[in-house]
Image: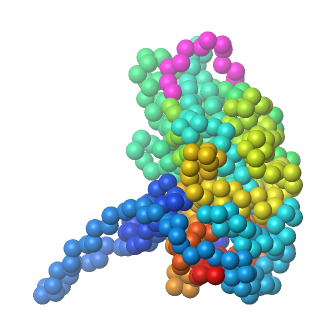
């Protein structure tokens, strides 16, 4: 995909699988819900006559168990010895990083941690933390339909790209979104005779694409023009994570509503008249849910929308540039050092983003550290740990950390980042001694196909760490 995000998994993977629980990650101190590593299990044929019946399945009782504060404390020398060989792998190229003890905040290993690097999608760690710090965790976005003139109805975008055009009760890519089908049903019940559908995208302003992005990435499935009205992240195939995107998201959404209403008229872009009567509305999932969807599937469109949402909440412009400013300012307001941070976007698609590993690790250590009344920042950003993919199990780590080969499988939770020549991994791991470590690792100058396994190897070594 040229100089853009590279995907290491088969396109078209669906989330509708038959799941069986095989293990539970129990990091109570560092997580707000139980997490599962799961694999597909197909139903078996009926057993031949005479074969004893299959035993009843074991009933799993998910629980969150505290991580002991008395777990042996690793030392900096121990961690350095443990990962030394893995950290010297030539596949890592230009390598920087930092590892910390989540319980104490002590830095246990570092290599040029303050050097600004292209973080790729590890940028989303900053976006997630800032959104959780700057917005109510239960915040929702409302997409509405108002009445225009001569039978026209106008869909007013609110900046929610999770709005879905999937039919009622059909599977959706994002979690618990509002639906076009619900808007259509409310419009029908309103008694308004609809002759045409229009869209109002005035909630956002400014360019819909950053100049550092390539329009080829629209067809490539990495991004779409960021408009205040979009459905299914502007995917052409609503359930395909890597589907090509449409280049006119708002008009497409209007056409989807027109189709649901059996209206055959061109969809136009207009500005809704002030005081127009609202006849339908749907709401997004809460902020925490949307942040975790963004992290789990490294969703660039959702990341950019969250940045704009944060900017508006802070009284800033509803623009892409406003989103980047809002992220850095929110982190600075909460005492995170952003002096060496340069953000051109909030998704990580731009090569002009620069973030030091020290900040990424600090955010992870803060999110996974002990909670207390005197640590409101930790409490606010902790929910993003739920959205981090599980090594060898979920999201963008589903096909990494091969079970049986890398000891980090099931124990590492981390955000991935991949551009051509850039690979990054930021997250947490519970060691064999029960200690929780945070880490941020950034590789550059080598192929992601080589760098990603090398990064995984470093994180796997941390899992095996007694390191005393």
> Image point 66% across, 13% down: which residue?
274
- Segment colored magenta: 265-281
Q: Is residue 411 visible?
A: no
Number of marks drawn: 0
Question: In the displayed image of the protein, which residue is found farthest to the front?
Answer: 70
Location of the N terminus by quadrant is: bottom right
Specify whether 220 is left or right of 256: right
In the shown orientation, is residue 197 left or right of residue 300?
Answer: left
Q: Residue placed at 52% from the left, 85% from the top?
A: 404
Q: Toward the viewer: 117 or 373?
A: 373
Residue 413, how many percent across, how many down?
Answer: 58, 66
The residue shown at (81%, 61%) is 356
The answer to whether residue 374 is above or below residue 351 is above
Q: Residue at x 64, y 76 (%)?
A: 74
Residue 103 appears anywhere in the view:
yes
Point out residue 231 in the picture as x, y percentages from the top left corner.
59, 42
């Amino acid at each position: 995909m040229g100089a853009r995000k590279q995907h290491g998994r088969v396109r078209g993977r669906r989330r509708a699988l038959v799941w069986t629980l095989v293990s539970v990650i129990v990091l109570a101190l560092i997580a707000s819900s139980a997490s599962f590593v799961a694999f597909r299990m197909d139903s078996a044929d009926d057993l031949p006559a005479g074969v004893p019946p299959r035993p009843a399945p074991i009933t799993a009782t998910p629980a969150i168990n505290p991580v002991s504060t008395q777990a042996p404390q690793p030392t900096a020398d121990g961690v350095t010895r443990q990962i030394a060989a893995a950290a010297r792998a030539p596949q890592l190229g230009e390598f920087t990083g930092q590892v910390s003890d989540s319980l104490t905040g002590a830095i246990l290993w570092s290599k040029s941690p303050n050097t600004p690097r292209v973080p790729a999608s590890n940028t989303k760690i900053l976006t997630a933390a800032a959104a959780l710090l700057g917005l109510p965790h239960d915040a929702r976005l409302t997409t509405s339909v108002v009445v225009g003139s001569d039978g026209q109805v106008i869909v007013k975008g609110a900046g929610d790209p999770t709005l879905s055009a999937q039919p009622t009760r059909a599977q959706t890519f994002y979690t618990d979104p509002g639906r076009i089908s619900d808007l259509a049903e409310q419009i029908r019940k309103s008694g308004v005779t609809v002759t045409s559908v229009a869209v109002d995208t005035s909630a956002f302003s400014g360019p819909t694409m950053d100049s550092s992005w390539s329009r080829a990435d629209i067809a490539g499935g990495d991004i779409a023009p960021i408009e205040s009205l979009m459905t299914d992240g502007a995917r052409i195939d609503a359930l395909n994570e890597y589907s090509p995107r449409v280049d006119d998201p708002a008009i497409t959404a209007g056409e989807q509503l027109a189709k649901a209403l059996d209206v055959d008229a061109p969809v136009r872009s207009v500005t809704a008249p002030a005081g127009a009567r609202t006849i339908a509305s749907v709401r997004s999932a809460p902020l925490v849910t949307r942040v975790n969807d963004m992290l789990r599937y490294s969703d660039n469109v959702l990341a950019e929308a969250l940045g704009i949402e944060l900017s508006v909440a802070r009284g800033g412009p509803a623009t892409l540039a406003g989103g980047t400013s809002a992220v850095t300012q929110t982190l600075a307001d909460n005492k995170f050092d952003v002096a060496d941070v340069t953000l051109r976007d909030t998704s990580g698609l731009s090569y002009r983003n620069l973030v030091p590993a020290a900040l990424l690790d600090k955010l992870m250590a803060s999110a996974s550290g002990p909670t207390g009344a005197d640590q409101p920042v930790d409490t606010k950003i902790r929910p993003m740990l739920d959205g981090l993919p599980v090594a060898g199990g979920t999201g963008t780590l589903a096909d990494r950390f091969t079970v049986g080969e890398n000891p980090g499988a099931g124990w590492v939770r981390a955000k991935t980042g991949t551009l051509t020549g850039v690979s990054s991994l930021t997250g947490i791991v519970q060691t064999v001694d029960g200690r929780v470590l945070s880490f941020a690792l950034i590789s550059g100058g080598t192929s992601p196909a080589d760098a990603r396994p090398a990064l995984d190897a470093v994180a796997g070594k941390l899992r095996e760490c007694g390191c005393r």
